[in-house]
Image (spheres, rainbow, N blue to C red):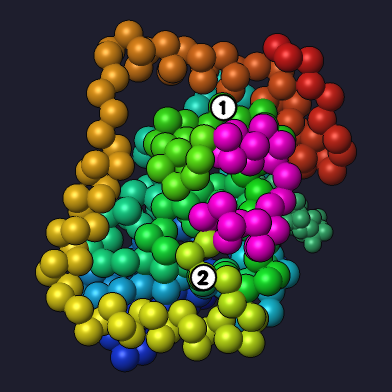
Amino acid sequence: MAEEELVLREVRDRVGIITLNNPKKLNSLSEALVGGVIGALDEFRAGRVPVVVMRAPAGQKVWSAGHDVKELPRKNRDPLGYFDSLENLLRAVEEYPGPVIAMVHGSVWGGACDLIMTCDMVIADETAAFAMTPAKLGVPYNASGILHFMNRLPINIAKEMFFTAELMPAERAHRVGIVNHLVGSDQLEEFTFKLAKVITTRSALSIEVIKEQFRIFSKAYPLSPSVFERIQGLRRRVYDSHDYEEAISAFLEKRQPVFKGE
Ligand code: YXS
């Protein structure tokens, strides 16, 4: 599928709508699909669209299956480097000069869960569920991704998500704060667009600068060079490990991984 078909884009009453449109691949965040989302955000930015809703097609069981595992490096390379597609996508959402609202029906996995945590708000229905999967895939994750969760959740809840990689159902996700509003699936679209429309009536200039202040302060963590280098060294130990290579192979071979802790 061409990039533009993987992602549908439209503007309705000054609300930008981005639809992840690769249900065959469960909207896994391939480079091509991510390119389509970033392209849509760039187009909306050029058109001064004040608010964006990101969604999957109606009725899908899976909102997004996360990073396209087939595009993860097999070994000895950081799977989530600064310039990798998932990271480019998360920064594009954070830097969009207006709210990006995730409208969620279906399950959300791994890098897509980080995408949800990076969106400015989440509106979900009872079918939504959220799983953070690096520990299943042998991935060390990365500092900015972990901060997305720490900024939104009590640290014990964030740790539970990372350490169990289990699906968190919609009701609990709402209770702990991942989801702003939990509504019935028959009201999801109407509720989301009503909230987005309210935002289009507010000062876009004020919202743009307020959102940028939230972004700056949510990342305001001074790190000494040696701490930064230690984190990079620890992460490299993971993505250079047997366990990382085994986890990716096991996923592709559709079997359970056998971790050795090395
Ligand atoms: O067998 P075929 O070739 O049709 O392909 C299957 C799956 O292999 C494929 N698929 C994926 N391909 C690449 N990347 C993915 N993330 C991915 N997920 C699925 O899609 C075809 C249909 O999948 P299938 O048969 O399993 O569908 P299902 O309805 O039985 O189950 C739906 C899911 C989502 C429960 C299941 O597909 C699943 O558990 N997918 C993996 C979810 C996941 O762990 N995602 C994390 C990816 S790694 C990532 O995001 C970060 C690096 S991290 O882990 O660090 O957060």
Q: Amino acid at mark 1?
A: Pro
**Towards the viewer: 120 or 137:** 120
Q: Secondary structure at mark 2?
A: strand
- Marks 1/2: CA–CA distance: 31 Å
Span colored in magenta: 156-178
The location of residue 259, given as percent across then percent down, is: 79, 21
Q: Is residue 7 left or right of residue 241?
A: left
Q: Residue at x 44, y 47 (%)?
A: 152
Q: Is residue 121 above or below residue 197?
A: above
Q: Quadrant of the N terminus?
A: bottom right
Q: Is residue 249 magenta?
A: no
Q: Specify the principal SS of the magenta part.
A: helix
Q: Residue furthest front?
A: 175
Q: Quadrant of residue 161?
A: top right
The location of residue 124, given as percent across then percent down, is: 57, 70
Circle 2 residue: 181
Q: Amino acid at mark 2?
A: His
Q: Residue furthest bottom?
A: 13
Circle 1 residue: 140
Q: Is residue 171 magenta?
A: yes
Q: Is residue 255 above or below residue 57?
A: above
Closer to the chain start, of discs 1 and 2, is 1
